[in-house]
């Protein structure tokens, strides 16, 4: 049956291949696992560990202490771990991204804490590190070991630094001992000298005692004599004080007298000089007042001319106001004539064809003649506005004249004549400048007259053109004129003019279109209407003429302003001559005040004139706006005439439009009639303003007369003023000469007083000093006597203790000698200690470990090989029993023993193959074995024992048995002691540890590979594995015997595994 079993394997390729592959499974399991962890501790230099140095160096014992920097320098030469020196931010990110297993942080106070070793409360240095055990626990363990070693190195380094610093202190102390010894020797020498000096001192003390005793007897009579001397000194001091107290009043009085005389002399000289200058200027003052009087007279003469011009302006405005009634009547006649327009429309349309061309030519000429009218009227408006502005400027200037005259009157009565006259001169110059500006401002006002004249000429030309139109007409059948005028007026109304401007435009254009009326083939003109229109034009010309007169009157006003300016220039020239006068000016000041009051009245009247001129300018401005609208209307009329000519050939439908236009003309004239009261009201306001201007001119003339009279009175007082000034000048010169003589004598006296005062003061100070010294001597005499007595007593005591002092100096000398000797011995002992760098290293690391190997394990792969090799062979046995049909009988009719031998033969061969292949190739792969025979024997025994145990479980219990084999595998993973010592393993695994096959195979493999466990280990392991194999074989035979007895051979649950994949039905 054994032969049949092998024949079955040979003939079944799948089984053969499976068996051969199973033989290599333990090797593959072992090689892959062991090579992955072959030498993990030998490659720790590749384990990434981040180092963050935040330490800040400090000063310790005068030296720079930077433990963090030194640690980093050392780690750069340390390859035990893969050190990465990064920032805290990068370290945190690296830990998060699984880049580092550990982060070592050197805190910023690392060196600072190290420097506290000698403080009262030293602080420990904390080396912080964090690990990520979840990333890999072994990596964490390796990091812990590396960090601990790093911590030990830091301790050693810091301790060495401490020791070095302490050694420096000890060396410094040794030098100090030597210096102290030298000092003590000097003390010894000094003590000898002190002893010698003390002897001399004691001898001197004895002599001192004798002398002081003599002096104590001699000072007793001194006190009475000093008291008498003190009384005499006090009397002398009091007398000198009285004398010194009187010298101050003498010096002050003489000095004040001299100063006062000097001031009088200076004032007298200045007075004399000022009076002389006043006398010299009096002639110029007389001349200036005379010129001022002449100017005032000229101003008085010119004022009536100015008043006459204002009256003429008022007359013109009043006449314009009177003519407004005629203008209103003409407009009413025009409105009533428009009522008959509708009746004559039919006649107009019959003759319009022949007269259209003539109408167009007349209107075109009219437009050309009126285009410059707005500019002329605007010029007139600007001229009247300038009248108002000039009047206001004249009023302002005259107001300043009034103010200036008032100030002149005030200043004439002032005391400082020269300064006041100069100010008066400046004010008169300012007033003159304002008059010149006013003359320039009113110089161009005559342009308004030119503009009015231009408008009048244009109206004359229009009137002439109307007459020529009438003369050119044929007198056949006459109709009421105004039909063509209605068309013109319609265009004017459509231009949006005011009532006043529209009336003026219609009056100016009346009769132009009438020349175009005809009836059938003849033209007819109403001569009455033409005469009426020409009359209205004449009325308008009259109004324009009055405006022209108003402009002419403005020219007269301008001439009067020019004359007033010239007169005031003379007045100002006269005022220039007033400079230098004084006294007798009160009468002149009163006269000037009267002139100022009159000038103020002139100012009031000029303001009224300005207000009236503004009113006139406003009215003319309104008329100027209307004139612009009039020219626009004429342009539209020209366009309408052209349109009329083009429409003459159209059908009778245009007649209806013409009728409608005539009705609109009638309505527009009615509106014009309503607006004439507004025009009449505006002209009335213009007349009222002109009356106001006229009323103020009388007051102006009166004020100018008062000004002229006042200046004449001032001129008459000038001779008296000049005479008084001459008398004052002569008296001032005499006063100055006498004052100078008095001042000279007082200055000589004042110069001798300081010497007298200084001598008395010095004498007084000397008396005080003498008295103070004597008084001090008197008060100290008793103290002196007491001090001499005390000094005598002290000298006696010193003399008595001189012996003890000599004994003490001898002891000091002996003690210093002993101190010097002992300090020298201490310095020798301290300096003889060898405090070198090696000594510091001994302090830092006093112990050194020496390691010897009882047994040597090269690396982690060799350490795990016994465990992995045993485990791989057991796994191979399980795989074989899963793949091979263990319950199959190769030949029927055989005995259970034959069936047992056939299966055991295959299992044995496979187990031997697995053991031999695994051990041989693993030694080739790099495992170094101390005992090769034991190595092979251990592999064979654990392979056979594992195969027989798994075969028994699979044969006896089929699949559940295989599951039990897997359970046994898991128990042996933790209980066999292949990784950690059993002493640190759970108690349960320690209980099952002796009953597991891998326990003994692992011990035997360790002995075979690296030795160290003793010779009896291998034999004990082999006996235990042999026992496991024999028991398993016995159980296997028993189970197979039972299976055949119950006819269960050839039946296995593995045979039904494929059926489980069939689709259920």
Image (cartoon, grey):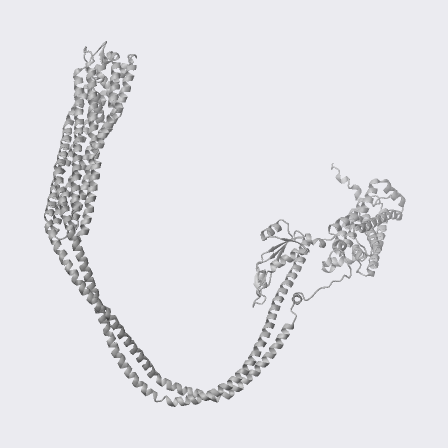
Q: Which quadrant of the view contains residue 13? A: top right
* Residue under the image location 26 percent in, 77 percent down: 241
Q: Choose between 359 and 904: the one closer to the eye.
A: 359
Q: Choose between 876 and 674: the one closer to the eye.
A: 674
Is residue 586 something one can see in this rendering?
yes
Q: Which quadrant of the view contains residue 223? A: bottom left
Q: Is residue 678 above or below residue 1001?
A: above
User: Does residue 5 appear left or right of residue 76 in this picture?
Assistant: right
Q: Is residue 103 above or below residue 501?
A: below
- Where residue 314 sits: x, y (%)? 14, 33
User: Does residue 223 appear left or right of residue 859 in this picture?
Assistant: left
* Residue under the image location 17 percent in, 41 percent down: 569
- Where residue 584 sits: x, y (%)? 12, 52
* Residue under the image location 29 percent in, 86 percent down: 228
- Where residue 987 sits: x, y (%)? 72, 59
User: Does residue 202 appear left or right of residue 991 in this picture?
Assistant: left
Q: Where does the C terminus fall, quadrant-wise? A: top right
Q: Choose between 440 and 61: the one closer to the eye.
A: 440
């Amino acid at each position: 049956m054994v032969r049949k079993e092998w024949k079955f394997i040979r003939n079944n390729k799948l089984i053969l291949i499976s068996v051969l592959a199973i033989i290599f499974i333990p090797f593959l399991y072992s090689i892959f696992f062991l090579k992955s962890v072959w030498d993990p501790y030998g490659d720790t230099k590749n384990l990434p560990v981040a180092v963050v140095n935040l330490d800040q160096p400090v000063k310790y014992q005068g030296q720079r202490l930077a433990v963090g920097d030194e640690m980093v320098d050392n780690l750069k030469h340390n390859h035990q771990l893969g050190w990465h020196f990064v920032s805290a931010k990068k370290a945190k990110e690296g830990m998060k991204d699984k880049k580092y297993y550990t982060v070592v942080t050197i805190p910023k106070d690392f060196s600072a804490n190290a420097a506290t070793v000698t403080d009262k409360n030293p602080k420990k240095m904390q080396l912080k590190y964090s690990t990520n055990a979840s990333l890999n626990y072994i990596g964490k363990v390796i990091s812990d070991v590396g960090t601990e070693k790093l911590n030990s190195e830091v301790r050693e380094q810091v301790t060495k630094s401490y020791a070095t610093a302490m050694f420096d202190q000890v060396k410094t102390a040794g030098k100090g001992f030597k210096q102290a010894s030298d000092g003590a020797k000097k003390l010894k020498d000094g003590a000898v000298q002190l002893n010698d000096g003390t002897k001399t001192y004691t001898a001197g003390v004895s002599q001192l005692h004798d002398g002081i005793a003599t002096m104590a007897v001699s000072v007793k009579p001194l006190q009475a004599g000093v008291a008498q001397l003190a009384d005499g000194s006090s009397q002398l001091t009091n007398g000198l004080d009285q004398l010194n107290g009187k010298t101050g009043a003498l010096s002050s009085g003489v000095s004040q007298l001299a100063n006062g005389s000097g001031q009088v002399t200076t004032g007298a000289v200045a007075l004399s000089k000022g009076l002389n200058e006043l006398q010299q200027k009096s002639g110029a003052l007389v001349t200036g007042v005379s010129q001022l009087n002449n100017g005032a007279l000229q101003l008085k003469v010119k004022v009536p001319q100015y008043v006459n011009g204002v009256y003429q302006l008022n007359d013109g405005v009043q006449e314009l106001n009177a003519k407004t009634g005629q203008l209103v009547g003409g407009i009413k006649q025009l409105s009533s004539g428009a009522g008959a327009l509708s009746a004559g429309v039919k006649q107009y349309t019959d003759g319009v064809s022949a007269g259209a061309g003539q109408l167009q030519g007349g209107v075109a000429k009219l437009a050309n003649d009126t285009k410059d009218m707005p500019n002329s009227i605007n010029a007139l408006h600007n001229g009247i506005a300038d009248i108002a502005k000039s009047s206001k400027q004249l009023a302002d200037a005259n107001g300043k004249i009034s103010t200036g005259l008032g100030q002149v009157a005030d200043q004439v009565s002032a005391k400082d004549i020269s300064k006041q006259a100069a100010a008066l001169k400046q004010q008169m110059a300012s007033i003159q400048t304002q008059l010149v500006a006013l003359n320039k401002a009113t110089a161009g006002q005559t342009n308004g007259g030119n503009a009015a004249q231009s408008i009048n000429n244009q109206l004359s030309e229009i009137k002439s053109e109307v007459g020529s139109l009438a003369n050119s007409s044929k007198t056949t059948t006459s109709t009421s004129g105004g039909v063509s005028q209605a068309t013109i007026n319609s265009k004017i109304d459509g231009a949006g003019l005011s009532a006043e401007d529209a009336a003026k435009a219609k009056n100016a254009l009346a009769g132009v279109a009438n020349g175009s009326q005809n009836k059938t083939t003849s033209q007819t003109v109403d001569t009455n209407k033409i005469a009426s229109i020409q009359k209205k034009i004449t009325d308008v010309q009259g109004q324009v003429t009055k405006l022209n007169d108003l402009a002419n009157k403005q020219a007269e006003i301008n001439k009067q302003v020019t004359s007033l300016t010239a007169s005031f220039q003379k007045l100002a020239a006269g005022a220039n001559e007033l400079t230098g006068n004084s006294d007798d000016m009160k009468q002149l000041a009163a006269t000037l005040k009267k002139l100022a009051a009159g000038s103020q009245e002139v100012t009031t009247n000029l303001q009224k004139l300005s207000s009236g001129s503004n009113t006139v300018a406003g009215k003319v401005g309104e008329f100027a706006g209307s004139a612009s609208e009039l020219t626009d209307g004429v342009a539209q009329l020209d366009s309408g005439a052209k349109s009329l000519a083009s429409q003459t050939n159209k059908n009778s439908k245009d007649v209806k439009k013409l009728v409608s236009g005539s009705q609109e003309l009638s309505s527009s004239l009615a509106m014009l009639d309503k607006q004439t009261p507004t025009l009449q009201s505006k002209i009335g306001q213009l007349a009222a303003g002109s009356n106001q201007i006229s009323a103020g001119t009388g007051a102006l003339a009166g004020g100018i007369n008062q000004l002229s009279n006042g200046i004449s009175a001032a001129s008459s007082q000038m001779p008296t003023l000049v005479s008084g000034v001459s008398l004052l000048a002569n008296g001032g010169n005499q006063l100055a000469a006498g004052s100078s003589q008095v001042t000279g004598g007082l200055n000589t006296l004042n110069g001798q007083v300081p010497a007298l005062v200084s001598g008395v003061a010095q004498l007084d100070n000397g008396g005080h000093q003498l008295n103070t010294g004597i008084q001090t001597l008197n008060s100290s005499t008793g103290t002196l006597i007491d001090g001499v007595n005390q000094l005598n007593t002290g000298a006696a005591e010193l003399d008595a203790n001189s012996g003890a002092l000599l004994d003490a100096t001898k002891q000091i000398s002996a003690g210093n000698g002993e101190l010097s000797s002992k300090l020298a011995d201490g310095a020798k002992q301290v300096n003889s200690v060898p405090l070198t760098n090696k000594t510091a290293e001994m302090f830092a690391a006093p112990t050194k470990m020496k390691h010897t190997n009882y047994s040597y394990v090269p690396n982690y792969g060799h350490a795990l090989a016994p465990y992995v090799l045993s485990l791989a062979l057991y796994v191979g046995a399980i795989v074989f029993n899963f793949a091979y049909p263990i319950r199959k009988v190769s030949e029927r009719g055989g005995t259970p023993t034959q069936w047992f031998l056939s299966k055991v033969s295959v299992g044995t061969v496979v187990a031997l193959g697995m053991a031999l292949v695994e051990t041989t190739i693993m030694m080739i792969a790099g495992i170094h074995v101390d005992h090769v025979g034991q190595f092979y024997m251990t592999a064979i025994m654990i392979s056979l024992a594992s195969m027989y145990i798994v075969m028994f479980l699979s044969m006896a219990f089929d699949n559940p048995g295989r599951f039990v084999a897997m359970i046994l595998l898991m128990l042996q993973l933790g209980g066999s002691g292949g990784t950690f010592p059993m002493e640190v393993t759970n108690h349960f695994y320690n209980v099952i540890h002796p009953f597991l096959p891998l326990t003994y195979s692992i011990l035997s493999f360790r002995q075979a590979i690296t030795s160290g466990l003793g010779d009896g280990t291998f034999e004990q392991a082999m006996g235990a594995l042999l026992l496991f194999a024999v028991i398993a074989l016995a159980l296997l035979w028993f189970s197979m015997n039972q299976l055949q007895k119950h006819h269960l051979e050839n039946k296995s649950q593995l045979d039904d595994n494929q059926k489980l994949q069939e689709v259920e039905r």
